[in-house]
């Protein structure tokens, strides 16, 4: 079993425990918008907890109120004793605060969800953070296979169930999406007893954010694909197939300028940029 | 010789029994405190024993009479033996009564012996197999040794020649009898059930279960609330010592008769649960040790001897095995058949839910779909995770009056989570047409309604239950209604019996709650419904656990069926012995595998009656029984049967009945505020 081997080698090579930090956010239920632990962040916590010989710490930066606190306690219910809370103003940019905290605690691996369920939910935070720290970033982490002499071997999830094996030098930042294993149940007792370790930090106002306009998102209409076929197998294949744009193209071995140009062209075609 | 030996034997046995009693009491006292009046409780033992306990025992007439003869004979014989032989009271009349008592005890022990040759599988073997012989030893020994005192044999017959030899044998027999009956009673022998059982009756955790002279209903089936206010207390039962002391005492009272095992649907389905073994495991945990000495049927698929525990070790281990495996606890459907059958009044379901509470609230280990269902209940107030604002989508065409608009109504119709289930929607539609035919002033809560909390509570998530219940109580407190009527026995039970514990001064939560079968029966008695003649085939009725055993409603559904002109062909197991459909207690969610499915067994019961249709009164039962593969009997809710048979009066007839009502019923509805 390769998994067992990796666990053993992890134990041998790292005499001291692997220091893992998980960044968690306040989620919201898609139907009722009630605050909860965010699904992807919970999966990140699950992945951290399933790593053998790892010491896991949780970190959250954001405004504090009782609703948020309840949601953050959801992570504590997974069997973690405390979560660090960096208090930030509602309009603050949390990147500097998180980067400072991570520099201070110096974890070897930082895990987090791909995108938040509330706020901007742009999914950029992990990239900005990785940039601020100067660390490599892995997206779509599906499994951590082994940690050996400061190098982690992971499986990255690609669309349609594909997996890619990557080796990354630690420290690194990795994001987890719904291809990672589902989070364990959050138990009421430990959630209520867990400690919220409040940390004070200066809030840096997000200048750009104040100029933004917010409006509720509208569901985009889906194109219907009508399959005219007499064979049930074809109809089933069509129904089961993931809708793909069809008009895409794969660019190999191009210069960054050429790549940027292609992206720019596509965005114009789709009407994102005018 | 015997004259000196007997008092010594008697009093040393009594002394040892007293020492054992103190040890046993100390074992029970390891449990959490629980208030119980000592003197008043002890005073009530005779009534509770002779009336309530005997009511259960009497379901098996032969054993009931046997127990009266044996136990009655023993108690009398023991008391008289202490007087006559212990204190040397040489009274001929007392001696004759003592002789009669021993004869009664002996005759009883003959039947006990006959029942155990060979023993049915539900009875425990091991030390229990020697009990009839010990009873005989005691009764024969006491009988013979009393003969001279009664004047049948000459005094001093045991003091010369062959008499010496006889006396020696007699002393041995009596020592055996006393050892079992006095010493064994408090040192863990089969007779322990008498000692612990009597005290269990005195300090029962649900004193309201027992009848009193005033008469009336005495039922206590709602789960006890868990205090959630102190965040440092452990929630639920992790180790045997976390049970209350009178629960531990209750476990110790088990007589291992296996009646619970015989009625348990999970055991019959081959799921790893046997209520008797579970209670014995709790005794093992309380005293410390392994289950190797258990001599009854094991949990299906789990050999005896591999589990053990102690008062302060976890009952369920996170990994590996401890006293009990988690799947044993999750197999229970909370149907209460075991509690109903238990002659020692042990509360199995309370114990199981207590242990489940720990697993869910502290371990976060609800198996299979459990975690998902609980998350849904927390986020969307229904177990299926449906949009809470879509609760009334199924009734878009029914124009249901909303409480939010009406503010008051005679009947508040509690729809339950069946609103999201297409099968149950048919039942609800049928019941609403019945209410409309009877012209009842009713209203629904609509989107303001939430899950009653039944599933959450039985899955051990007391926090979610209390949260749902408190919010429901708050909603209900805004409106005025005379009674709540529901088609779901689970909501019915929770609203009726479990919300009251969460009452506050400004928000009382005591409601008159009726199951729809009870309410339809009232409407029929009031002459508000008229039916066509029944033309269908044979019908049987399946009692839902939460309506029958939990709330004692066996009559109303049968009365309604009778009013429809249906003659119910009863199943062998019906009424208080009804077999569960397998749908209660979150069992379909935790879904512990067995050898067969519980609803299949129930439909087999139906098939034996030859019925073409089984009438039910519960959305869970409907779903479980309809899940059985065809060919099988059809399943219809009582509301559907009633709605099908309704003779709806036309507007003209109504106008003829009540003069000032020229408008059509449709218009009346729209005008209503």
Image (spheres, helix red, strand yellow):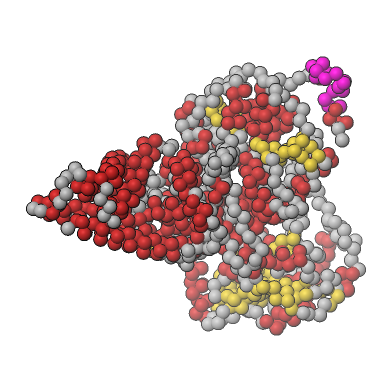
What residue occupies the far left of the structure in this picture? B161
User: Which quadrant, please, contains the C terminus of chain A?
Assistant: bottom right
Q: Is residue B269 left or right of residue B584?
A: left
Q: Position of residue A116 (x, y in %)?
A: 75, 64
Q: Residue at x 36, y 64 (%)?
A: B19
Q: Position of residue B349 (x, y in %)?
A: 52, 50
Q: Position of residue A88 (x, y in %)?
A: 80, 74
Q: Residue at x 78, y 32 (%)?
A: B441
Q: Is residue A177 left or right of residue B244?
A: right
Q: Is residue B613 left or right of residue B83?
A: right
Q: Is residue B124 left or right of residue B593?
A: left
Membership of B556 in magenta stretch:
no
The magenta stretch is B652-667
Camera-nearest residue between B329 and A157: B329
Membership of B659 in magenta stretch:
yes
Q: Residue at x 83, y 70 (%)?
A: A90
Camera-nearest residue between B241 and B290: B241
Q: Residue at x 31, y 49 (%)?
A: B80
Decide: is B277 above or below A1.
above
Residue B613, quarter of picture: top right
Camera-nearest residue between B360 and B262: B262
Q: Specify whether residue B481 is in view.
A: yes
Camera-nearest residue between B424 and B192: B192
Decide: is A13 above or below B431.
below
Q: Specify whether residue B128 is in view.
A: no
Q: Position of residue B401 (x, y in %)?
A: 80, 36
Number of marks present in the image shown: 0
């Amino acid at each position: 079993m390769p998994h067992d081997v990796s666990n053993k080698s992890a134990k041998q090579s790292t005499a001291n425990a692997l220091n893992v930090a998980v960044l968690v956010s306040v989620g919201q239920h898609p139907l009722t918008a009630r605050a909860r632990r965010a699904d992807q962040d919970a999966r990140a916590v699950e992945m951290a907890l399933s790593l053998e010989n790892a010491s896991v710490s949780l970190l959250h930066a954001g405004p504090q109120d009782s609703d948020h606190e309840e949601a953050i306690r959801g992570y504590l219910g997974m069997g973690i004793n405390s979560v660090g809370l960096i208090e930030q103003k509602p309009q603050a940019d949390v990147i500097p605060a998180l980067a400072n905290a991570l520099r201070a605690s110096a974890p070897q691996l930082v895990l987090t969800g791909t995108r938040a369920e509330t706020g901007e939910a742009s999914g950029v935070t992990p990239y900005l953070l990785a940039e601020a720290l100067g660390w490599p970033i892995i997206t779509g982490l599906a499994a951590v296979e082994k940690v050996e002499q400061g190098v982690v071997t992971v499986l990255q999830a690609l669309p349609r169930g594909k997996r890619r094996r990557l080796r990354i030098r630690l420290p690194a930042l990795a994001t987890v999406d719904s291809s990672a294993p589902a989070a364990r149940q959050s138990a009421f007792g430990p959630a209520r007893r867990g400690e919220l370790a409040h940390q004070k930090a200066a809030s840096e106002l997000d200048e750009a954010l104040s100029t933004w306009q917010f409006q509720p998102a509208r569901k985009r209409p889906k194109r219907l694909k009508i399959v005219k076929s007499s064979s049930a197998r074809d109809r089933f294949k069509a129904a089961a197939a993931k809708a793909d744009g069809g008009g895409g193209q794969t660019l190999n071995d191009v210069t960054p300028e050429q790549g940027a140009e292609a992206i720019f062209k596509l965005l114009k075609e789709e009407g994102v940029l005018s | 010789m015997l004259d000196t030996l007997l008092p010594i034997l008697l009093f040393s046995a009594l002394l040892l029994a007293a020492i054992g009693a103190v040890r046993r009491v100390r074992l029970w006292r390891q449990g959490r405190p629980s208030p119980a009046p000592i003197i008043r409780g002890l005073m009530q033992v005779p009534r509770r024993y002779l009336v309530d306990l005997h009511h259960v025992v009497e379901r098996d007439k032969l054993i009931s009479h046997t127990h009266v003869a044996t136990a009655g004979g023993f108690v009398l014989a023991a008391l008289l033996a202490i007087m006559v032989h212990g204190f040397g009271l040489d009274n001929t009349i007392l001696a004759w009564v003592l002789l009669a008592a021993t004869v009664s005890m002996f005759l009883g022990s003959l039947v006990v012996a006959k029942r155990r040759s060979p023993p049915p599988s539900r009875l425990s073997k091991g030390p229990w197999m020697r009990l009839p012989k010990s009873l005989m030893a005691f009764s024969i020994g006491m009988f013979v040794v009393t003969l001279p005192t009664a004047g049948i044999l000459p005094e001093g017959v045991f003091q010369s020649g062959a008499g010496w030899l006889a006396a020696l044998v007699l002393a041995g027999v009596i020592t055996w009898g006393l050892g079992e009956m006095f010493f064994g009673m408090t040192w863990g022998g089969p007779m322990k059930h008498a000692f612990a059982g009597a005290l269990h009756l005195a300090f029962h955790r649900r004193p309201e279960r027992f009848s009193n002279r005033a008469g009336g209903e005495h039922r206590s089936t709602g789960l006890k609330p868990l205090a959630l206010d102190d965040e440092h207390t452990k929630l639920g039962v992790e180790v045997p010592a976390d049970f209350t002391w009178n629960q531990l005492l209750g476990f110790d009272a088990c007589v291992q008769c296996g009646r619970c095992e015989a009625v348990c649907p999970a055991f019959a389905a081959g799921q790893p649960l046997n209520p008797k073994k579970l209670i014995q495991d709790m005794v093992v945990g309380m005293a410390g040790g392994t289950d190797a000495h258990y001599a009854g049927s094991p949990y299906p698929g789990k050999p005896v001897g591999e589990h053990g525990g102690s008062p302060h070790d976890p009952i369920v281990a996170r990994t590996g095995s401890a006293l009990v495996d988690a799947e044993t606890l999750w197999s229970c459907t909370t149907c209460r058949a075991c509690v109903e059958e238990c002659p020692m009044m042990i509360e199995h379901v309370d114990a199981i839910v207590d242990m489940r509470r720990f697993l869910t609230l502290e371990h976060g280990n609800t198996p299979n779909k459990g975690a998902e269902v609980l998350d849904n209940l927390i986020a969307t107030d229904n177990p299926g995770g449906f949009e809470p604002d879509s609760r009334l989508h199924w009734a878009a065409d029914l124009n249901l009056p909303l409480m939010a608009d009406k503010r008051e109504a005679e009947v508040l119709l509690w729809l339950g989570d069946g609103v999201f289930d297409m099968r149950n929607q048919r039942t609800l539609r049928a019941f609403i047409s019945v209410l409309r035919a009877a012209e009842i002033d009713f209203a629904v809560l609509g989107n303001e309604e939430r899950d009653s909390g039944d599933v959450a509570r039985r899955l051990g998530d007391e926090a979610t239950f209390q949260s749902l219940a408190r919010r429901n109580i708050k909603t209900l407190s805004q409106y005025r209604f005379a009674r709540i009527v529901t088609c779901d026995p689970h909501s019915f039970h929770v609203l009726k019996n479990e919300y009251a514990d969460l009452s506050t001064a400004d928000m009382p939560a005591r409601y008159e709650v009726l199951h729809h079968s009870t309410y339809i029966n009232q409407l029929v008695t009031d002459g508000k419904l008229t039916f066509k003649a029944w033309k269908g085939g044979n019908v049987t009725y399946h009692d839902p656990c939460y309506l029958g055993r939990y709330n004692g409603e066996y009559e109303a559904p049968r009365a309604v069926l009778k009013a429809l002109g249906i003659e119910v062909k009863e199943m062998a197991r019906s009424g208080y012995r009804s077999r569960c459909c397998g749908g209660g207690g979150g069992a379909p969610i935790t879904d512990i595998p067995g050898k067969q499915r519980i609803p299949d067994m129930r439909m087999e019961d139906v098939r034996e009656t030859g019925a073409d249709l089984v009438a039910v009164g519960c959305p869970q039962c409907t779903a479980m029984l309809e899940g059985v593969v065809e060919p099988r009997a059809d399943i219809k809710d009582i509301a559907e049967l009633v709605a099908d048979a309704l003779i709806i009066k036309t507007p003209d007839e109504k106008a003829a009945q009540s003069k000032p009502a020229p408008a059509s019923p449709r218009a009346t509805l729209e005008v209503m505020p």
